[in-house]
Image (cartoon, coloured by chain):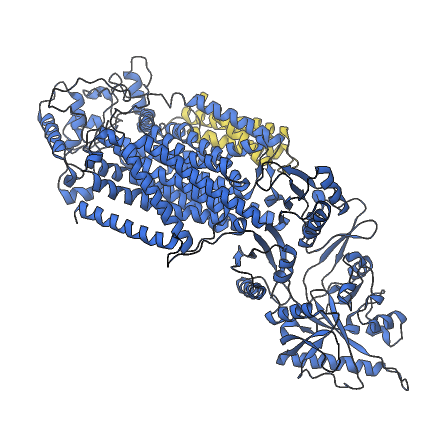
Chain colours: A yellow, B blue
Amino acid sequence: MGMLAWVMMGLAIWHFTIFLPDRFWGGIVGAFLGALFGSIIFGFIVSGLGVPGQSETHLLTALEAIPGAVIGIALVYAEGVRRERAPAPA
Amino acid sequence: MSPRARNGLILLFVAGLLILSLLVILPGSPAQKKTRLGLDLQGGVELVYQGKPTPQAKVDSSSISRAIEIMRNRVDALGVAEPEIQRSGDDQITVGLPNVTNVQRAEKQVGTPAQLLFYDWEENVLTSNGKTAASQLTAQDPEALRISQAAGDPSAGLSLHDAVTLAAKQPVRGGQDISRIGPQYWLFDGRKQLIAGPDETKKDLLSELSGQKAPPGSELVTVPQGTVVLQATYRKAGDKPKNLNLVKWYVLRDRVSLFGKDITDPKQGTDQNQAGSPPDVEFKFTDKGKTAFHDVTRAIAQRGQSLSLPGSQSANLQHFAVALDRELISVASIDYRNLADGIDGENGAIITGGFTIQSAQDLAKLLELGALPIGLKLISQSQVSATLGKQALDQGLVAGLAGLLLVMVFLVFFYRVLGLIACGALIVYGIYLFALVKLIPITLTLPGIAGLVLTIGVAADANIVIFERVKEEIRGGRSISAGIAQGYKKGLSAIIDANVVTLMTAFILFMLATSGVKGFAFTLGVGTIVSLFTAVLATQAALGTMSRSKLISSPAALGAGKRERRWHFDFMGASKWFFSMSGMILIIGALAIGGKGLNFGIDFTSGTRIQTALAQPATEQQVRDVLTADGYGDAKIQRVTGSALGANVVQISTKTLQPTKVESVRASLEKAFGATRSFSSQSVGPTFGQTVANSALIAIIASLLVISAYIALRFEWKFAVPVLIALMHDLLITAGVYSLLGREVTTATVAALLTILGYSLYDTIIVFDRIRENVPRMPRAAFSQIVNRSMSEVLTRSLATSFSTLMPVLALLLFGGQTLQDFAFALLVGVASGTYSSIFIASPVLDHWKGREPAYAQRRRRIERESPDGKVPAYPTPAAGADADVEPEPPKRRRLRRGPDRVTTPDQPEEISAEEFEELKRDIADDAAPAAPAAGAASRRGSTGGRKGGGGNGAPVAPETADPEPQKRTLTDPDVDPGEFVHAPDEAEGGGMAPEERPKPAAGKRPRTRRHGRPR
């Protein structure tokens, strides 16, 4: 159940990347993957390398995914910018 | 064959099939077939067993098949009509017994292992010190003597707790002569009373308890493999206490001398030499059995002889025990004085011990049919009363008819004559499908009815897609007959794509789902195939035949009289607001999932649910008082309002109860409140719940993979990713809504979710199909403009298809029973979310992703430079110079067949009308005329000059370097610097979308409304 909450929150946060300039590595799909994996990995770490079950999930479980999703999106964005700035191979 | 003859032949075929179908359906017809109703519609008992290995056999295909055969023989012997016994998954067997009302009796008669075991009694029975009686008889140990001579009688037996505790202290033992493998778990309370067990796993044991946790002070006892705890024999049938804690038990080493498979020809008999003797069971041995029986009885006799005291008159008789499924049924003595060499087994043997004639006959029958080759564990059982079944059937039929009626009204209102033909096709579809249900035969279940109702929407959708195309063609200037032909031709690919996806999800569902949902998947699959035939082939033939009739001579009769009202909306521009809305909904959903979780039904969590109509009114507290006396005080009790079963319907949810306990609850309720008018129960064990959950997860993942692969093959892989994202969006939003509303998630919900996966794609495919079609036609447009244009063209039909599906779903929600309402609710949320995501999620994601491709990015930059405000307009405008619609190059195959293509070459020359011919002549004249200042016309003529259109699947194609005409190169090459050539300004289409005021044509002259065959 915890995984479902993380994935939902990650997907929700991704929706708002539409307001950012599309400089993501892999575009909107790259941002999607960044949000998804970011939320899952962060949630997994915060929960002590486990996934909360049906009875262990609470409101905070969903909120735990937000920083992860934001970090994931930021990383994909940063990588996109870095690749843009990288000099083209001669 | 001419089209007219072909249409006639198809209609003849349709009519022939219709007559045959009616023969199958109509009562009194010689070919009439009976409709096979499922247990949920006619009442009955369903038992689901999981195979467990025994030391003699493992659970594999062969042992499951053998078990099914034996169970079928048992059911046949019971005289149950039309039973359904089938394998489910790798190791499960589902048994459906229509019209059976007593689940306990059914379980006993069908699922009893009937494992007959023969033990050397003294050599195996243990005394309280854990030693065998035989080993202590020489020393004349009093306890050993007492147990030996009691011969299984309760007088020397132990209490259950003592017996299990003694067994738990024994070492683990293996070998081919043991009757069970693995440990056995028992749970006792502080008063040493059994509260759960025996079970093969701790998880199964705990599932019998409230909260699935052992109560404080309880004691878990594990009996290792190699030791068995057997009930004592009770001489009279009524002597045995019902409470297992009061029954006496013996502990034996599990060393079986002879198994049930070694006996033959069992039958009920009586001792002929003794008048009034009780009934017994007589049988003979196989050759192997004879030898084994002789060997063991000889050993027993010899032991008796060795133990006899010299000079003593009393015989120290030794015994031979017979047990059936862990219950001693007879412990017979072997008199060594008369049978010093044992019993040779030639004349068989007799089992005596407290039989009635009925029980002796039952045992003989069980032995005759044979023991099950494997162990069977009952993991789910449900019982539906016939009253409830009939009520469900009535509700399902009303929902189906209401759904059909609503869809038909919608079709006629929206499509006039075309709608009438579609209604005819829907009726034909219904008749065909019903005949197929009878012929195959498909067992009609409640979820199956939901599948049938849903396919009404699917069938209507196919017609809507085609009719919209037909209208589009006719509005574009084609004749009625050519419009019909083109509409069917162009609409077919989208319909096939959508239906293939629905079929694939139905197939996955059928392979992985539980039996009830299998019915849904099967009817959905069959219905989809039949609907393709009726909605596409039959209606095309009907319309083709009628195309020259007065009935459809006017475009207005087809709903194509007015100019099409196209949407003029910047879908891509507004997508950020729709994305935000979805994001907000998902945040709320995620918080709901986190805070409340999902309310999983007993299908997933295990437990028992009883629904019964009490004869007398009773409050929830009164019902609870009755249940508390039975030990189920923590059960959840709800009154069911609005049920057709009356006002006194209660639903009781509790931990998983075995059939005996369900019957005990029923008896208690009947004692307190009178005979129940309807009693239905469903018990699901944790194993079954886990299986259901795993299957659901696998089905969802498999569906997503298959759908992605199909989309990638039919379109391109970049189209598959937005589809996946949109599907995830639909599933998660549906999950969020379920969590928010606290609705119960059942297997029906999962089936509905999988259907949504297939259905949600219908709209997406329609939009993507149009994008794919428009990409080569708009070689200068930005991708967002192509998507906007495509969406504006197909939004009406997307909404119409969703509406036509929502209507039968709404009918299910309003008129269906509880199960159908579960389906309908998930479908309602899913279809609504699917329509939304197709338009506002999948397409914008595709736009963002494809728009990044260098060719489209360059187009965008060019349009931005050319645009006065530096922005890309929503639709191609002359200022932006982006609208350069061209006719895409037709496939080579056609060109070879028909010679070099011209834009004026009709797609269906044989269908062309005189009026259209005149129009084509005008087209040619226009094309031949000098085109100043018609740069737009030049651009339109592009396709006539051998210019290659856009690449297939939307990839812009590099310019042809050999092309001598720079203008034409410009049109096809988005990467070329626009300043290099003189641009042909794109023709304005009123923004591409808005209805355009055109000068009225002079009398007798028809305006040119079609441009190179492409409707505008």
Quarter of the picture containing the C terminus of chain B is: top left
Q: Nearer the viewer, residue A2 or B77?
A: B77
Image height check: is B2 above or below B577? below
Image position, residue B103 (x, y; %) = 63, 55
Quadrant assignment, res B94: bottom right
In the displayed structure, does residue B459 sit left or right of residue B517?
A: left
In the displayed structure, does residue B578 sit left or right of residue B58?
A: left
Image height check: is B201 above or below B296? above
Q: Nearer the viewer, residue B881 or B182?
A: B182
Quadrant assignment, res B938: top left
Image position, residue A12 (x, y; %) = 51, 27
Q: How many marks?
A: 0
- The residue lying at 48 percent from left, 38 percent from top is B812
Image height check: is B513 above or below B866? below
Q: Is residue A84 in view from this perspective?
A: yes
In the displayed structure, does residue B915 sit left or right of residue B506?
A: left
- The residue lying at 16 percent from left, 25 percent from top is B1008
Q: Nearer the viewer, residue B900 or A32?
A: B900
Image position, residue B292 (x, y; %) = 68, 79
In the displayed structure, does residue B708 sit left or right of residue B934?
A: right
Q: Is residue B776 in view from this perspective?
A: no
Image height check: is B14 above or below B812? below
Image position, residue B470 (x, y; %) = 26, 34
- The residue lying at 85 percent from left, 79 percent from top is B316
